[in-house]
Image (cartoon, grey):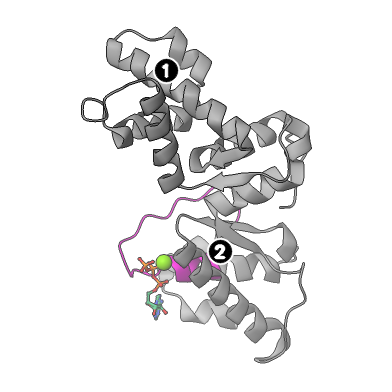
Amino acid sequence: MQYLDQLNDKQKEAVLYTEGPLLIVAGAGAGKTKTITHRIIHLIHNGINPGSILAVTFTNKAAKEMRDRVLTLLEERVHGVSAPITHGSVPFVSTFHSLGVHIIKENAHLIGLTKHFSIIDEGDAISIIKDVMREHDIDPKQHEPRKIKSIISKSKGDFITLANYKGEVKSSQQSIVALIWGGYEARLKNEKGLDFDDLLLESVQILKKFPEIKNP
Ligand SMILES: Nc1ncnc2c1ncn2[C@@H]1O[C@H](COP(=O)(O)OP(=O)(O)OP(=O)(O)O)[C@@H](O)[C@H]1O
Ligand SMILES: [Mg+2]
C-alpha cells in the first residue's frame, strides 16, 4: 500500500493497529499528525465509512491542519489530485468544543436546551462574573474574578454541579464562589448561553443519557 511507504516503522505500527484504543506519545514535530491522518486513510482503505470517523483536536489551528491533510490524502487516493470529495463522505475533524456545539445543536431538545443558544466566550464569562460580584458587593480586589471563574471552570470540568459544590462548602471563600456561581448560571440561563465548559459538559451529558446517538 503506497500510503504506508511514507511512514517509519513506529508510525506504521500505529497505523496498522486497528483493534481498539491506542495511545501515541511523541514530541513536537515527531510525526503524530502524519500518523493519525494515515491511520484515518488506512481505516477508509479497509472499508470503514469515512462519515463514521471522528478526529478531535484541542485548537482550531490543529483541526484545520488535520482536516486539510486528511482531505489531501483522500483526494490523492480516491479521486486523483483535483477532483472534489462529496460532502458526507469525509471524516468529521473538529475541536472538542466545536464537536460539543454540533452534538448539542443536534440533540438540544433531549436535555431541555434550545438549539439556538449563544456561546459565552471567556471574555463574556468574566464580565458576567464581574457583574454578579458588583450586584453582591463583592470586592474584585479581594476575590479576583478570573480566579473565581477558573474555580467554576475546574469544577464543571470535574462534573461537579453547582448543587454539589454548594453541598460541600467549607470555607468562606467557597461560599463566595458558590454565590457567584449561582448568579453566573442564572445569567447564562437567562441569555440561553453556554460557556466553553458547558459545551463539553452538556455534550457528555447527552452522550451518557443517550448512548445510541451516533454520527456527528
Ligand atoms: N516518516 C516520515 N518521513 C518523512 N517525513 C515525515 C515523516 N513523518 C513526519 N514527517 C514530516 O515531518 C513534519 C512533522 O510531521 P507532523 O506534522 O506529522 O508532526 P507532529 O508530531 O504532528 O508535529 P506537531 O507537534 O507540530 O503537531 C511534516 O513535514 C511531516 O511531513
Ligand atoms: Mg501535529
In the rendered structure, which disc, 2 or 1, sits on the residue that comes first in sequence?
Answer: 2
Based on the picture, tell me whether residue 210 belongs to the magenta stretch. Answer: no
Q: Residue at x 76, y 69 (%)?
A: 89
Judging by the rendered image, the residue that carries numbered circle 2 is 16
Task: Report the disc number at residue 170.
Answer: none
Q: Position of residue 47 (x, y in %)?
A: 75, 66
Mark 2 crowd level (few <14, some 14–19, many ≥20, 10 Å Cα): some
Q: Is residue 116 above or below residue 190?
A: below
How much space separates mark 2 and mark 1, taking CA atoms? 52 Å
93 in relation to 135, above or below: below
Identify the residue shown where x is 36% and y is 13%: 175
Q: Is residue 28 in sight in this rendering?
A: yes
Kind of residue at disc 1: Leu
Q: Is residue 42 above or below residue 22?
A: below
- The secondary structure that most of the magenta stretch takes on is loop
User: Which quadrant would the N terminus be assigned to in this image?
Assistant: bottom right
**Which residue is labeled 1 in the image?**
179
Q: Quadrant of ligand 2?
A: bottom left
Q: Which residues are magenta?
A: 18-37
